[in-house]
Image (spheres, rainbow, N blue to C red):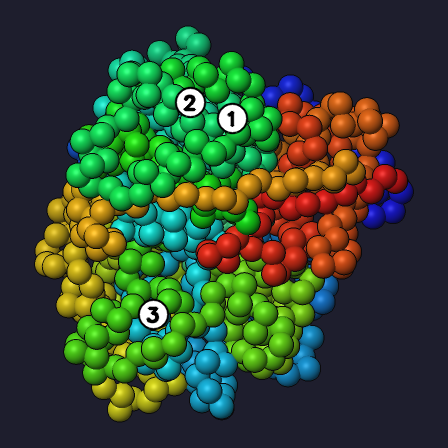
Amino acid sequence: MSFDDSSKMKSKIKITPPASFAAGAKGVQVALKHAIDEMGPVKAMKALAKLNQEKGFDCPGCAWPDPDDKRSLFAEYCENGAKAVAEEATNKRTGPDFFADHSIASLQSWSDYELGKSGRLTHPLYKAPGASHYVELSWSKAFDTIARNLNALKDPNEAVFYTSGRSSNEAAFLWGLFARAFGTNNMPDCSNMCHESSGVALSQTLGIGKGSVVLDDFKHADVIIVAGQNPGTNHPRMLSALQECKLKGGKVITINPLEEAGLKRFKNPQKPMDYFTQGTSITDVFLQVKINQDLSLVKAILMALLKMHREGWATFDLDFIKQSTEGYEALVNHLDQCDYDQLIAQSGVSKEEVQKAVELLAPANKIICCWAMGLTQHHNAVDTIKQFVNLLLLKGSVGIKGGGTCPVRGHSNVQGDRTVGIMHHVSPQLNASLKEVFNIQAPEETGLDVVASIQAMYEKKAKVFVALGGNLLSAVSDTHYAQAAFEQCALTVSIATKLNRSHLACGNESLILPTLGRSEKDVKNGKKRLVTVENSMGKVHASSGHLTPASKLLMSEPEIVGSIAAATLGEGHQVAWKELGQDYAKIRASISRVIKGFEAYNQRIMKDGFYLPNNARERDFSKLPNGRAQFTVSSSTGIELNEDEFLLMTIRSHDQFNTTIYGMHDRYRGVYNSRDVIFMNRADMSEYGLSKLDQIGLVSTYDGVERKVHGFYVVPYDIPRQNLAGYFPELNPLIPINQTAEQSNTPISKSVKVKVLLP
Ligand SMILES: Nc1nc2c(c(=O)[nH]1)N[C@H]1C(S)=C(S)[C@@H](COP(=O)(O)OP(=O)(O)OC[C@H]3O[C@@H](n4cnc5c(=O)[nH]c(N)nc54)[C@H](O)[C@@H]3O)O[C@H]1N2
Ligand SMILES: Nc1nc2c(c(=O)[nH]1)N[C@H]1C(S)=C(S)[C@@H](COP(=O)(O)OP(=O)(O)OC[C@H]3O[C@@H](n4cnc5c(=O)[nH]c(N)nc54)[C@H](O)[C@@H]3O)O[C@H]1N2
Ligand SMILES: [Mo]
């Protein structure tokens, strides 16, 4: 950026005090503006009327559930759900002419915002070896290109099959089946960057990698903890559930380095009275933890509860502990050895505030812990989440009405994709079923996850990359390294709705295959097809779009997967891939034979859907050692910083869905017209001689390698000292590919050690 550009830019940025509440009339107004700008008024109304309705389509935004009982027209969407639909159902198109006008190299200089706003993809596109542009090609040639490249590999493990969590259960099941039939478990998934740490921590302690609560539990909870999550932006409909809890007398404890607007106060857009009143105050106790110090904070809370328990307050549920858990004594011994004052100091929260939380928790037993990326994307993420599980187990809060675990999922079907078999791990049970039902011998060695896939591509050990959705290049850490990894491949393929940066980091050959979005009508031979998804609370239900597809050439995801498989494995293969890809009811029938919990799948989705089995919800811990839920002891600590170091968290603005940038504002945090900002404590700013909107750079130096970004504007903010915040994906170049959470291998996107570079 030249000096002129930067001063022009600076004059456009507007900084206001952060908002004191979320949603309200403004939320509705912004939602409608986005929808109408992208789709025009008639289509916008048509689209929003079917969102999250029975016989409608599942919101392509987050995975928050819809109520089981009542759904009112226009009621089950939120501002950011409307933006997600607008982005998908836009009237703009990116066809062959666009790609004739713009070379791949020139598109690389576009921002993510500009790329996304170019519109929906309409044609299959191909970049030949050495070519500078994408050109149109036929579907059959596209499938042949993939088959030729896959069949040329020396080993099936040289292929990588990525999934992003928007794909339906049907598409994902077929995808996993194909990868295994082809001979690899290289199935990296967006959840490797997301809730993998939750999956690992919960499987080890409670025997299931998913949460245990259902939406109804929120009404019954005494206390809800919301840790490392910003629902006002990322799961707006969750605020209605928190409001309901509050109105019934429940309490909310928020643990976050930032005081996010949605957790302060909520004016429910579906309750007209809220427009004219103050709405509902959400958080009762705000624990402003330092980044990466939740583990210290929760341990301090456990110590305080233990002390009260010993004083005779019966704060722990000893019956439950005795009957259903293991490891209580070890945990108590460990807590006895911890230093309370030290934990408090590390957490950055005052003793008084911690005590307020303890007083809410002590008499309660219906406790729900909610969390998202603020807990999962750290070196110590798995151990941190296990401390929250310790708390729930001590209180007997797992598997009761009004209590349990609630990892709040990201993508709208990320949980379903995992359930139906997308994973790089080996499941002996799944492999046995695939053998029985399809006579497929699935590989028995663990495959590559996201980080390992990028490393393998970089080292040329993986040569063909095929993505079912997503934008892995921008989503994964170490952007420049990742770009080189993509460009080393023989073939890169993306099945996508819209153009993104991953499509511009091409292998020797590259393909973009345009597909239907959730909101679109999926018709084959005159018959409408529907797909199914699983929400964050384990309920499977149907989703059926109704808008006219963006182009006649679009193919549905299951059909694309079926066709790739047929081309690669040959028409004579024991699985009738093409037929299966076209007939989703047949895919569902297969799922019900292969995966437990999907019995009578086709029948049960015709009504309102069904919940999958959940052992933690039933207090059945029979799969765990000695049939008991596991307390865990962790000696890991938070990150210690030198005087000149900061911990950076890379978070979402209010105007983005992951790497899709809806707009340039972060309304609730009071930032307008720029994403190149770094939130910083005022005292740190004055120590560095910085004023509001001064430009800085950041550098990380892991393993002695300098990774830098430049040209970010400082925004004074209420954030703990030596902590910084900024947006992903812009800051991903700072995160080394090999810096990941222990056990889950999730990139450390929320605690990157950096130094500030002054101009
Ligand atoms: N509109 C919209 N909706 C979305 C998405 C989107 O991008 N846009 N993305 C979807 C996806 S895939 C996901 S995974 C979810 C993400 O949902 P969130 O996890 O809410 O998203 P982030 O912006 O990453 O926010 C993390 C929160 O954690 C806090 N935090 C950071 N570090 C720490 C820490 O060390 N401790 C604690 N206690 N808190 C910390 C941050 O201040 C922030 O409030 O949302 C989903 N829904
Ligand atoms: N630094 C940092 N990095 C992060 C995170 C962070 O908090 N900080 N968060 C991480 C998290 S939680 C996640 S989940 C990942 C997200 O990683 P991804 O899931 O890979 O990324 P998205 O941005 O959600 O993918 C957007 C693209 O998906 C395609 N798409 C949209 N809808 C559909 C559809 O219906 N079908 C198909 N086939 N394609 C579709 C469009 O082409 C769009 O450009 O990013 C991770 N990266
Ligand atoms: Mo996510």
Res. 480 image quadrant = bottom right
Question: 723 above or below 495?
Answer: above
Please tell me how crowded label 1 is: few (under 14), some (14-19), or many (20+) other residues with Cα within 10 Å: many
Q: Is residue 317 above or below residue 534?
A: above
Q: CA distance from mark 1 to mark 2?
A: 8 Å
Residue positioned 69% across, 39% down in the render = 641
Eye-nearest disc, 3 or 2 = 2
Q: At label 2, which amino acid type do we have?
A: Ala
Q: Which residue is mark 3?
A: 426
CB-based contact (under 8 Å), mark 1 and mark 2: yes
Q: Nearer the viewer, residue 128 or 94?
A: 128
Q: Which amino acid type corresponds to the residue marked 3 in the rendered image? A: Val
Question: Which badge, 3 or 2, comes first in the chain's sequence?
Answer: 2
Q: Which residue is mark 1?
A: 340
Amino acid at dot 1: Tyr
In the image, residue 667 sits, relative to residue 441, either above or below, namely above
Q: Is residue 328 visible?
A: yes
Q: First in sequence, mark 3 or 1: give its number.
A: 1
* Label 3 element class: loop
Decide which of 723, 78 is in the foreground and name it. Answer: 723
Q: Nearer the viewer, residue 594 or 144?
A: 594
Q: Residue furthest top?
A: 277
- Left or right placement of residue 34 versus residue 579 in this view: right
The picture places residue 694, in percent across and down from the top left corner, at 82, 32
The image quadrant of residue 418 is bottom left
Left or right, residue 405 beside residue 464: left
Res. 304 mark: 2
Q: Residue at x 17, y 39 (%)?
A: 323
